C-alpha cells in the first residue's frame, strides 16, 4: 500500500519530466522541464515545491519552503486559539421544585447563557408525576420566559422517556461572550490598580500632614540658621585663643 505523504514534494523529490512553473510572486512562467525549474530555484536561492501534484502537468512554485512551513504552522496555531467549542450544560429540575431551589437553578442557567453556552434543561418525573406532564411543561415555559433576555428556546419541550427536555441557546455567541469577559477582567484590573495608587497617595499625604502638625505643636524649627551652623567653628576658635593665652602666661 502506498504510504501517505503529508508534505508536498520539493526539489529533487519531484520525479516528473516537466511542470507548470509559478514564480515566487505568483507570476506564471509556463510549462518547463523539471531540470530547468530546479536550476531557476537554485539561482534564486529558493525551493521548487509541487503545489498541485494531480494537475496535468503538475504545478510547482518557487518559494522559501522553510518560511512557508513556519507561516502555515502559525496560521494553524492561531486558528486553534480562536476556535470556539460549543458546550452544552445540563440542569435538572423536579416538577414540584421549591421556589428557593428554582431561583438557584435559574441563576445557574443565566450564568451558563452569559458564558455563551447552551443549556439543556431536564425535568425528571417520578412515580405519579409521570401522569402530570403539564407540570413539567409549564415549569419549562416559566424558565424560558425568565431567561428570555439571555437565551432563546432552541429545542421546544418534549417528552424523553420519564423526562422532559428543553434546550436554550444563548443570544450571544461564545466568542463574543468570552471577549466581553476578558474586557471586564481587564477593566477590573485597571480600576483596582488605580484604586491602590490613590490609596497610597492619600496615605503619604496623611503622614506628611501628621509630621507637619507635630512640628508646629512642639515649636520645632526645622531650618538651620547660620548662627547654629557656625557654632562648632566659633567654639573651636575660642578654645584655641584660651589655650594660647594660658601658654603665654
Image (cartoon, rainbow, N blue to C red):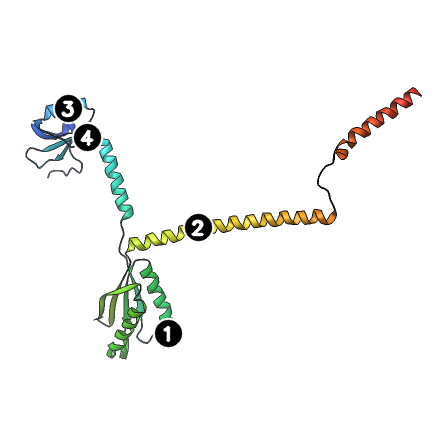
Quick check: marks 1 and 3 in contact, CB under 8 Å? no
Q: Which residue is mark 2?
A: 189
Q: What is the number of the mark on residue 63? A: 4
Other residues around mark 4 within 10 Å, as few (<14) / some (14–19) / many (≥20):
many
Q: Nearer the viewer, residue 148 or 57?
A: 148
Tell which circle, 4 or 1, labels the residue nearer the N-terminal end.
4
Quick check: marks 3 and 4 in contact, CB under 8 Å? no
- Image spot of residue 215 (x, y percent): 70, 46
Q: Nearer the viewer, residue 159 or 167?
A: 167
Q: What is the number of the mark on residue 40? A: 3
Residue 189 placement, left or right of 63 = right
Foreground mark, 1 or 3?
3
* Distance Cα–Cα, label 4 vs label 1: 68 Å
Q: Quadrant of residue 37?
A: top left
**Image vertical order of residue 150 relative to residue 194, above or below:** below
- One can see residue 176 in this view: yes
Residue, x 43% and y 53% (percent of image)?
Answer: 188
**Image vertical order of residue 178 relative to residue 79, above or below:** below
Other residues around mark 3 within 10 Å, as few (<14) / some (14–19) / many (≥20):
some
Foreground mark, 3 or 2?
2
Quick check: marks 4 and 1 in contact, CB under 8 Å? no
Residue, x 71% and y 48% (percent of image)?
Answer: 216
Q: Which residue is mark 1?
A: 99
Amino acid at each position: 500500500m502506498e504510504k501517505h505523504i503529508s508534505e508536498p514534494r520539493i526539489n529533487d523529490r519531484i520525479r516528473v519530466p516537466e511542470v507548470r512553473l509559478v514564480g515566487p510572486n505568483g507570476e506564471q512562467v509556463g510549462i518547463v522541464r523539471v531540470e530547468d525549474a530546479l536550476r531557476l530555484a537554485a539561482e534564486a536561492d529558493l525551493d521548487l515545491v509541487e503545489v498541485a501534484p494531480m494537475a496535468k502537468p503538475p504545478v510547482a512554485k518557487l518559494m522559501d519552503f522553510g518560511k512557508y512551513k513556519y507561516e502555515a504552522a502559525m496560521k494553524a496555531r492561531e486558528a486553534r486559539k480562536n476556535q470556539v467549542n460549543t458546550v452544552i450544560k445540563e440542569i435538572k429540575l423536579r416538577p414540584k421544585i421549591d421556589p428557593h431551589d428554582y431561583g438557584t437553578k435559574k441563576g445557574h442557567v443565566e450564568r451558563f447563557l452569559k458564558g455563551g453556552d447552551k443549556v439543556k434543561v431536564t425535568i425528571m418525573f417520578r412515580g405519579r408525576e409521570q401522569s402530570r406532564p403539564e407540570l413539567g411543561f409549564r415549569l419549562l415555559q416559566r424558565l424560558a420566559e425568565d431567561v428570555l433576555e439571555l437565551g432563546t428556546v432552541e429545542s421546544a419541550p418534549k417528552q424523553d422517556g420519564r423526562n422532559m427536555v428543553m434546550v436554550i441557546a444563548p443570544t450571544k455567541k461564545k466568542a463574543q461572550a468570552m471577549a466581553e469577559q476578558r474586557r471586564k477582567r481587564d477593566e477590573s484590573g485597571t480600576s483596582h490598580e488605580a484604586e491602590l495608587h490613590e490609596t497610597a497617595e492619600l496615605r503619604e499625604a496623611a503622614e506628611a500632614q501628621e509630621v507637619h502638625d507635630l512640628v508646629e505643636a512642639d515649636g520645632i524649627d526645622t531650618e538651620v540658621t547660620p548662627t547654629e551652623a557656625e557654632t562648632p567653628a566659633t567654639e573651636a576658635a575660642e578654645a584655641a585663643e584660651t589655650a594660647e593665652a594660658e601658654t603665654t602666661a
